[in-house]
Structure formats: C-alpha cells, structure tokens
Image (cartoon, rainbow, N blue to C red):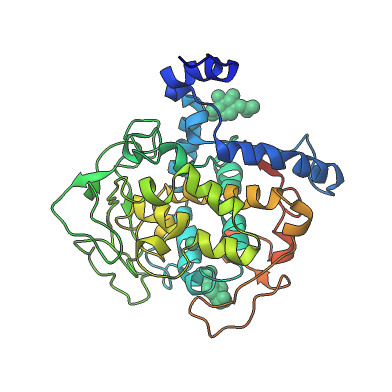
Amino acid sequence: MARLTLAGLLAVPWLLFPGLVAGDAVLDLQEKGRPSIDARIANSATCSKENLQVRREWGDISDEEKKAYIAAMLCIMEKPSRLDPTRFPGAKSRYDDFVVVHMNQTMTIHGTGNFLSWHRYYTWAFERALQDECGYNGTQPYWDWGRWADDPENSPIFDGSETSLSGNGEYIEHRGSGIVPAGNGGGCVLSGPFKDMVVHLGPVAPAVNPAPPANPRTDGYGDNPRCLRRDMSNQLTSKYARTQDIVSLIENSANIGTFQNVMQGTGGGGLAGMGVHGAGHFTIAGDPGGDFYTSPNDPAFWVHHGMIDRTWTIWQSQDLENRLQVIAGGTSMFGGGRAQSLDDLIDLGVVADQVFAIKDLVSVVDGPFCYVYE
Ligand SMILES: *[C@@H]1O[C@H](CO)[C@@H](O)[C@H](O)[C@H]1NC(C)=O
Ligand SMILES: *[C@@H]1O[C@H](CO)[C@@H](O)[C@H](O)[C@H]1NC(C)=O
Ligand SMILES: [Cu+2]
C-alpha cells in the first residue's frame, strides 16, 4: 500500500473539488516572473504601486465586477461614433470606432512584428475608453483559455447568464468554414447581456457558414445591421489552448520571433498551425467573431486579447531585461513589407490620443501602461 505523503494529503481537497484549484502551471510562471516586474515598477517614471491596475480572470472577479464591465461595454455601444458617417456609415457607436480602426489596419498588425504591441495598446485603449467615457472603475478582465478548455460554452464567460459575455449562438444546421470546424451554434446569440446587440460593420472575410449578408460597400464600412452570431465548441480549446499548450508556448519560445509565430500559428496551415491566438478566435467563431477584420465587434474579443497580452507579459517576465526591447517579423502580413523596427509607430487613430513607438509599448509598467495580471 502506498504511503500517504504530505503532498498527497494536500492534493486531496483539489481532487475532490476541482473547481477549487487556485493555481496552475501558467499561474506558477506568472508568479515566478512577478518580482522582476515589481522591480521595474520601482524604477518606472510613470507607474507606481499606488496607480497600478490589476487585471483578473473572468472567473475570479465578483458578479458585481462582471456586471460593471458589461454595463460599461453596453454604455460604449450607445455612445456616438467620432468617425465621418459618410465615409463610415456602419460606424454607429463609439464601440464601432474600435472595430473600424482594427479593420483599417488588419493587414499590417497580424503576422507582423507589431502584432503584440499593437494589440496591447489597442486593448488598453479600450479599457481606457470604458473607464474615461463610461465611468467604469474596474480593469480589462481576461479569458484563461486553459482554465475552461474542456468546456468553454459552460464557462462563466460564455454560459449565457447575466454575468457572462453572452452564450453560444442558437444551433442551426451548418458546415464548418475553411479551417474552422462546425461548432454547436452557428446562429444568433439569444442569451445574456449582448443578445440584442446589432452588428453593423462588415463582413470582410467571414469564416462562418452560412455566410452573413454581404456589406453594401466592398470595404465593409457600410451599414449592414444583423445579429451577433457565434459557433462555439471545445474542439479547438481542448487540443490547442490547454494549460499545457500555454506553458509550452511560454517555456519553449527562446526568442520573440518563435513566441509570436507559435502563438499565432506557425503558418503550417490546418489546425495545428492555429496557435492559441487562432484557437481563441475560432472558438468564439461566427460573425463577426470569426472574421479576421471585424473580430473586435464580438464583445468577447477583449477577454481573448487580454489573455494574449497576459501570455506575452508572462513570457517577457521570465527574462525581463532581455525580452522587452526585442522585435522580429515584418511590417506586412503576407510579406512584401520591410523588417519591423522598435522605432515604428503605432497609431490607433480615433480611439487613442497618442502615437507611440513600439519600443514604448513593450513594458506593462512603462510608457502609457501601469498594470499587471493576477
Ligand atoms: C486608416 O489607415 C490610414 C493609414 O494608416 C490612416 O491614415 C487613416 O487615418 C486610418 N483611418 C481610420 C479610420 O483609422
Ligand atoms: C465601482 O463601481 C461599482 C459599480 O458601479 C460600485 O459599486 C463601486 O462602489 C465603485 N467603486 C469605487 C471605488 O468607486
Ligand atoms: Cu487583431
């Protein structure tokens, strides 16, 4: 008979109550890197322990905090757009301004050297807009893909409750689309806070079956009112976005080029080349979530990109001094551009006041940023 060890004894409650597991291997890496971030805060010109913002996982914030985040998103969807309505007739709200900025720059912010820094600044600008324009006093939560990898549809993020970001789409008979497998939905989202949301912009490159109605304009900026659709399942998260996949990405990427390529898919094509980035997007799937250009129009985009940014932050923190001012990749998604430089500028147009060089957006506790993940 095996001897009962102390470790074995300590493991018992977690076996009996798996929902109580507080830590996992990604969290361990996060904690390992935290002292180097704290040391950097101590030397930061702009960030201190007093103004530090803490971003948490959706499952770790209270119902009140979830409701405040949801209310702020619904608020920004009601605020007027700041774009010219003759050029962007589909931009009906301030939220849509964010969607337009992403659509406009899609080809130069994915598979490029600025992918991580661009989306960090973009997600931060959205968090800022919720705070400054809608009185939100919380932070941008994130979706730990690994935590809910077995069953994302029943996670507190997507269970369709009042404290979720709405549930899956209604099941309709449909096929998969390209490399995106057919999920358990495909139709309109009918549950949760965003069930009445009207999507206006796009589609541009829809990856959902049946395809949404075409936009009246070829650039996708026309007004094309329709429901929010999702096509969720666990097919991608359970294979490509488990905790062990995130750990492997962090531990086995020796340099930024490997990290950003593996995260976004190695380009090998097919499902294995998808990486955690594609796995998250195509777990939401549907329209606009499965459309490369308009994906921020799904309210779950931000928790997904919160986790993208958290994963980058943890990777950086494993060797902070050598992993901040580093860059790899080009300026254009399909090649043809030049090598990206840390001096290249990131301009979010109508959704952020300032233009920053990439080198000023690499640290979460320098430049405009002052936040950590817990
Ligand atoms: C679209 O991108 C171009 C070139 O980067 C820029 O000049 C323009 O202001 C952008 N438009 C919007 C609406 O962001
Ligand atoms: C933050 O907002 C929530 C919900 O609106 C409110 O209950 C809470 O008191 C606010 N906290 C602070 C510190 O203002
Ligand atoms: Cu993007």
Instruction: Name the image quarter holding residue 222.
Output: bottom left
Residue at image x 33%, y 47%? 197
Residue 265, above or below 369: below
Q: Nearer the viewer, residue 211 or 341?
A: 341
Q: Going by the picture, which residue comes out furthest to the bottom? A: 336
Q: Can residue 306 be seen?
A: no
> Against 289, is 33 above or below?
above
- State whether residue 281 is above or below residue 62: below
Which quarter of the rendering shows the C terminus?
top right
Residue 14 pos. (x, y %)? 48, 21
Give residue 110's position: percent from left, percent from top: 51, 68
134 and 103: which one is in front? 103
Above or below, comparing residue 194 to residue 273 in the picture: above
Q: Quadrant of residue 268?
A: bottom left
Q: Position of residue 309 (x, y in %)?
A: 58, 51
On the rendered structure, is 153 left or right of 76? left
Q: Residue at x 42, y 17 (%)?
A: 16
